[in-house]
Each structure stands twice: as structure tokens, then as C-alpha cells.
Amino acid sequence: MAEQIGLVLLCAFMTLVLINIPIATALAMGSIATMFIFDISFSVYADIVITGFQKFTLLAVPLFILSGIVMDRAKISDDIVQFVSLIIGALPGGLMIVSIIVLMFWGAISGSGPATVAALGAVLIPAMVKQGYPAGLSAASVASAGGMAVVIPPSIPLVVYGVLANVSIGDLFLAGIVPGVMIGLFMILFVIGVSIVKGYKGQKQGTLIEILKSFRKAIFGLLTPVIILGGIYGGIFTPTEAAAVAVIYSLFVGMVINRAIKFRDLPRILADASTTSGSILIIIANAGFMTWLITSRGVAAVGAKALLSVSDSQLVIILLMEVILLIAGLFIDGTSILYLFVPILLPVVKQVGLDPIWFGVMASMAISVGMATPPVAVNLYPACRIANISLFDISKYVWPFVASGLLALLLVALFPRIILFILAL
């Protein structure tokens, strides 16, 4: 029976996704259709959804989203871009390298890939086009680098995974630093190579005085991840409390330091944060119900058993899990991926002797790749709108950046300690 339920659930859900039904609706309708076919009672729906939301840790999701929006409105990205440009902008492809570094840093503020692309793309993409970079390449670099926001802490998918797997979100954040930076370095190496071949020049190197002046303006933005992550690892506050601190600090920077935010702006900011948070929380609600259906009806156990039967090799199992997550990333968002596949894959992870922390970070890396791989590619669409190009135009340029993520995934498959060694320090 579990096999039939799993097959019907998968077919129903994927059919709805492929005909362009919104993910949250597809999750709900797929579950309801399966329950109707197999005569499963609907009476538990409300209880499952309410129970799923009664987790204090999930409060970090809307709070991190709010802090990212406030930081965007505070205009601190301009100061950070200027500071990084003065330091490394003289390299071949300097502005594109600056974009990747700033996007990497901004991911440590927003925790959301699309939000990072939308916040910084409006500044970075036109600037790169003005300097002679192709619009498709400029947009592809921003869209791909924006995916690092789900790997580098604080990451919303890592928060969701920590809740699902019941593991330390602080450890997940710490373990995500090195893989996130690794993906960024691979992208930078690709940009330098392409720039040398194509003749994309760097910018003027900043003097020491210019760098120090720029640093003074950017310091409050640069301190944001230090305060968030330092507070968590120092045991001062929990990840959820860190999200609340991030909101307070971002409001302080925006209203007192930069004075870019006025009291009259707060309703609009709260409305934007509510809209973004609401869309994610609706997905969490319906994905949580589908997860309950998968686990309670034995589908997860059957899937785990099938995967373990393929091979006894840990490496083969790791590669299979990565392929599954990458294929899922072609069609559905990161939150849904976690809710659908963690119940199936986490028992496999434990069975083959892998650390759940490792799996959470690896899954977030796969999700980051999926953010730039069509047809779903949630990071590509805002980048296309900003650059005023089609999905086809950006797709021609995005694959080398996707390859950077795939190379990082291969390395963590071959050497899992890449993720975990920082926890041992």
C-alpha cells in the first residue's frame, strides 16, 4: 500500500507543478487527491498544520526576512559594494567579482536567495552592463551567487532543516560557512578566467585613505553577520532570538545611523515582509502535511529501504542523494524539497554513518544550485526582470556558475569532512 500511495502522491504533485500550479497549492491538492483515492480521513489536516507551526524556532524565518528587507531599505548595500570595489575591483572582471563577494556577504544578512537577488541585483546588474559585461552574464552571475544565501548562515532552509531533523541550528549555521565560501571562490575563479579571455577589465584600485573612509561608512553593515553569528556561537542568544536581534539592529542602522528609513516607511516594510513570509509559511504548512502523509503511511520507510538496496557504498549513496535533490531542484523550491525528502533521506544518512549536520548543509548546497537551474530557478526570474532579458538569454550564461555548485557538491561527496571540520575546532 505504501508504494501505491507514494506513486500516486508523486504523480499528482508533479502533474500539478508541471501545469504551473503554485507550489503551495500543488502540495495541498496532491495530498488531498491522494487521501481521497485511498480513503484517508481529512479530519487531521488542521491538527497537523497547527502542530507544525507551534515550533518556536520557525519564528526565525519571518524575522530574518524582515531584517533583510530593513537592511535593503537602509541602503547599506551601496556602501558595502563601494568598500569591496576599492579592495579587489582592480582584478580582471573586477565588478563581477565584487558582485559575487557582496552577494555572499548579503546572504549572511537576508538568508533568502530571491530576496538577495532582488535587493542587490537592481544595483549590480545595471552597473555591470554599463561597464560592458553582457546583460545575460551579469544577470546570471547575480542569480547564481544569490543562491549562496541558502548555504551561508543565517539560512532559512537551514532553519527549516534544523526543525525537521531536530538538530542544532547553530551547528548548521557554523557548518555552512566553508561550503558557502567554497562555492563563491569557484565562481570567482571562473569569472577571472572568462574575463582574461574576453578582456573584461577591472576598476581603479583604491588608495589606503579611500579604503579606510569607505570602511567607516560600511562598518555597520559589515557588523551584521558578526553580531548574529557571534551571538549564537557565543551562547548569548538562540537562532530565533538572533533573528529578533537582527531586526532591532537593522532598524537601528536604517533609522539612526543611515537615516534612510523613516517611521512612515515602516508599514510598507512590514507589509513586504509579511507578503514574503506568508508565501513561505503557506508552503511550510502544506509541505508539512504532505510530510505527515509520507511518514504516517510508510512511504518514507519504503523509499529509504529502496535507496539503501542500491549499493553498500557510502559514496554511491551520497551521490544518489545529491542527484535526487538536484533533480527535485529543477521543479520545486527549497522548502518543499526539505519537507518532502528529509523524511526519506535522513534515515538513509544515519544508516550509512553520515552526520545529520552534514546532510543538512549538503542539501542546502543542492538547493542553491536548483535556484539557478530552469525551469523553476527562483533566482533567475528577478534577475531577468532587472536585466530586461528572457529566461533563454540568461540560461546561456548560467551553466558555468551552476558547475561551480556542482563541483562543490562533488567535493563534499568525496570529502564529507569539508563540511564538518569547522565544528571540531
Image (spheres, grey):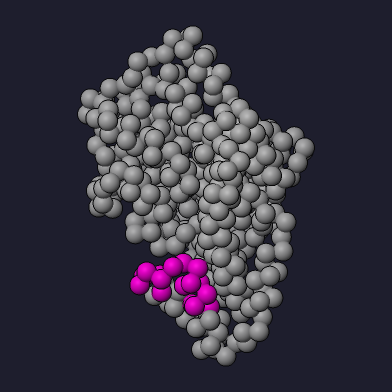
Q: For the view shown, which residue lies furthest in the right direction?
A: 236
- Which span is picked out in magenta? 16-31
Q: Closer to the camera, 153 or 250? A: 250
Residue 375 is left or right of residue 67, and the answer is left
**Can the viewer see residue 170?**
no
- Residue at 53% of width from left, 52% of height from top? 272
Height in image: 60 above or below 258? below
Residue beneath the point at 72% across and 64% down: 54
**x%, y% of residue 394?**
28, 47
Residue 143 visible here: yes
On whether residue 212 falls in the magenta region, the answer is: no
Tell whether position 27 is magenta: yes
Residue 101 percent across, percent down from the top left: 45, 31
Image position of 207 with respect to 39: above or below: above
Q: Quadrant of the N terminus?
A: bottom right
- The single residue placed furthest to the front in the displayed view is 264
- Extreme-left residue of the structure: 198
Please state which of residues 294 and 263 is positioned toward the viewer in this rendering.
Answer: 263
The answer to which of 148 and 260 lies nearer the viewer is 260
Is 296 positioned to the left or the right of 218 in the image? right
Q: Residue at x 38, y 39 (%)?
A: 122
Location of residue 424 by image quarter: top right
Dominant secondary-structure state across the stretch colored magenta? helix
Q: In this view, does 50 lie above or below 350?
A: below
Report x, y in % for residue 198: 22, 29
- Residue 57 location, x and y as percent? 70, 54
Instruction: Please determine whether, in this image, residue 225 is positioned above or below residue 207.
Output: below
At horizontal 59% and vertical 76% (from top left) the residue drawn is 293
Quarter of the picture holding the C terminus: top right
